[in-house]
Image: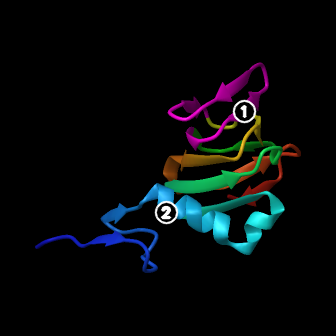
């Protein structure tokens, strides 16, 4: 039996044995949506119980306030320049940079230039809650 691979531009399922994306095309789509007028936009590309992959587009100056995630995350810069601040350190990330954060590591993010970022979130046991500064759960 052969597994089917899904490729955009049609609307594929978010969870399948194989998912393929053109991240340049996906970023262009984010820039073309009305939400981009707010200075940031995001799309969940992959959605499993224990894993999410989210493509984010940020304008220069766009900020995501301090928060925590129950899962471990990676932040990979595809284009532009961002600053991610942890509780003890700030990281200036450029294209090709990859940063990993342990679960519940507080952080915020700012676009220093127009940027595209690939966020991967892995939750232990499929628990996918995000924790804000006040430690109240909210869905990621």
Q: Which residues are magenta?
A: 75-102
Name the residue nearer the viewer: 72 or 136.
Answer: 72
Question: Toward which corner of the image does residue 138 lie, by quadrant?
Answer: bottom right
Name the residue nearer the viewer: 81 or 67.
Answer: 81
**Residue 49 visible in the picture:** no
Query: Which percent across, then down, holds residue 104?
Result: 69, 37
Q: Which residue is mark 2?
A: 25
Q: Is residue 85 magenta?
A: yes
Name the residue nearer the viewer: 69 or 37.
Answer: 37
First along the sequence among labels 1 and 2: 2
Q: CA distance from mark 1 to mark 2?
A: 25 Å
Q: Which residue is mark 1?
A: 84
Q: Is residue 114 magenta?
A: no
Query: Which percent across, then down, holds residue 26?
Result: 52, 63
Label 1 residue SS: strand
Q: Magenta region, mostly helix, strand or loop?
A: strand
């Amino acid at each position: 039996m052969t597994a089917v691979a899904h490729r955009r531009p049609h609307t594929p399922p978010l969870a399948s044995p194989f998912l393929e994306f053109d991240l340049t095309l996906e970023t262009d789509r984010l820039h073309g949506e009305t939400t981009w007028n707010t200075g940031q936009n995001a799309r969940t590309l992959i959605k499993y119980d224990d894993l999410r992959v989210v493509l984010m587009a940020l304008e220069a100056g766009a900020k995501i306030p301090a928060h925590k995630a129950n899962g471990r995350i990676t932040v990979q810069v595809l284009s532009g320049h961002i600053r991610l601040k942890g509780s003890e350190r700030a990281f200036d990330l450029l294209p090709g940079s990859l940063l990993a954060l342990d679960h519940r590591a507080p952080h915020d993010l700012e676009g220093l230039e127009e940027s595209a970022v690939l966020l991967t979130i892995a939750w232990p046991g499929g628990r996918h809650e995000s924790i804000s500064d006040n430690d109240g759960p909210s869905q990621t």
